[in-house]
Image (spheres, rainbow, N blue to C red):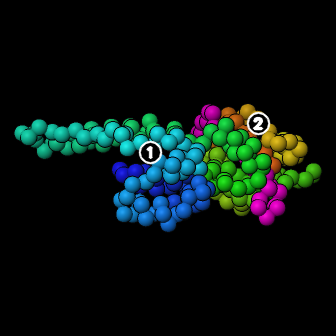
């Protein structure tokens, strides 16, 4: 895979277009796009700035990453050739899986972003689909009110909360005590820079009992338009569903 394609692939994994990544990195999109399209050399500084914007190691884009090719002998049977191809493909998948942690988002990265941007909802495209945003809770609210559910957030992936309507329906089935504590957590977090809590969940969702533990970050943020919101990021530590 070429360096340009690796850049595009990394942006895609972060749910970003190349243009959005260039904006976050302070690069001119037309220049980088032309370099990739015309197979021209891409300056290291550009790669480094994209890596920083995407919060991944610059080594992810190394052109010295080994390729894998297993060749059958000239007199091999069709079955042996197929086995060689399957083995090579399996190793390629394994290497990709080993590299995948570099593309994951950690709680430390979210905290670094919060501190760097002072709670302003900017330069956030790289993690937007991994967090949920809520309206600021008020005393007496029956449940947190969602503003936006990230398509890859913990709620979306494990609780099937894919949009605001589903959130209301699913959370309405939770234990009232759990929901009350959730509102209290939102109220408490609104008075702090951020709040980190290790959580336990044990609820029946769509006929399945979902049990597990996760680490939760709640942090008040403000959109460029001045709308105050509560950011929620959860990192799974253990889950079972049956």
Q: Is residue 240 magenta?
A: yes
Residue 109 drawn at (x, y percent): 65, 41
Q: Going by the image, does 198 lie left or right of 109?
A: right
Dot 2 and dot 1 residues touching (CB under 8 Å):
no
Residue 155 drawn at (x, y percent): 66, 48
> How many residues crowd around disc 1 within 10 Å: few (fewer than 14), some, or many (20 or more)?
many
Residue 125 position by quadrant: bottom right
Residue to which mark 2 is pinned: 196
Q: Disc 2 versus disc 1: distance between alpha carbons?
A: 32 Å
Q: Going by the image, does 103 lie left or right of 230?
A: left
What's the magenta region?
221-242
Q: Residue at x 76, y 35 (%)?
A: 197
Q: Residue at x 52, y 40 (%)?
A: 57
Farthest residue, direction right: 139
Image mark for residue 61: 1
> How many residues crowd around disc 2 within 10 Å: few (fewer than 14), some, or many (20 or more)?
some
Q: Is residue 7 visible?
A: yes
**25 or 191, nearer to the observer:** 25
Secondary-structure class at tag 1 = helix
Secondary-structure class at tag 2 = strand
Residue 118 drawn at (x, y percent): 78, 48
Relative to 58, does residue 40 appear above or below in the rendering?
below
Q: Residue at x 64, y 46 (%)?
A: 154
**145 or 229, nearer to the observer:** 229
Q: Going by the image, does 152 lie left or right of 70?
A: right
Q: Is residue 238 magenta?
A: yes
């Amino acid at each position: 895979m070429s360096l340009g394609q690796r850049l595009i692939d990394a942006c895609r994994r972060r749910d970003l277009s190349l243009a959005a990544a260039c904006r976050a990195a302070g690069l001119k999109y037309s220049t980088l796009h032309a370099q990739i399209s015309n197979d021209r050399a891409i300056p290291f500084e550009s790669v480094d700035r994209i890596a920083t914007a995407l919060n991944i190691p610059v080594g992810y884009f190394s052109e010295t990453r080994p390729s894998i090719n297993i060749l059958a002998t000239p007199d091999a049977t069709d079955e042996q050739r197929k086995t060689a191809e399957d083995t090579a493909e399996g190793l390629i998948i394994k290497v990709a899986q080993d590299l995948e942690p570099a593309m994951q988002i950690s709680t430390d990265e979210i905290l670094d972003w919060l501190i760097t941007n002072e709670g302003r909802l900017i330069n956030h495209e790289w993690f937007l689909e991994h967090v949920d945003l809520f309206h600021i809770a008020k005393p007496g609210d029956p449940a947190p009110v969602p503003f936006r559910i990230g398509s890859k957030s913990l709620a979306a992936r494990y609780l099937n909360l894919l949009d605001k309507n589903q959130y209301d329906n699913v959370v309405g089935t939770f234990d009232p005590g759990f929901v009350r504590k959730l509102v209290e957590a939102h109220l408490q977090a609104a008075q702090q820079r951020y709040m980190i809590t290790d959580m336990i969940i044990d609820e029946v969702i769509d006929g399945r009992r979902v049990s597990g533990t996760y680490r939760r970050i709640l942090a008040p943020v403000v959109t460029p338009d001045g709308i105050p919101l509560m950011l929620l990021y959860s990192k799974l530590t253990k889950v079972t569903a049956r």
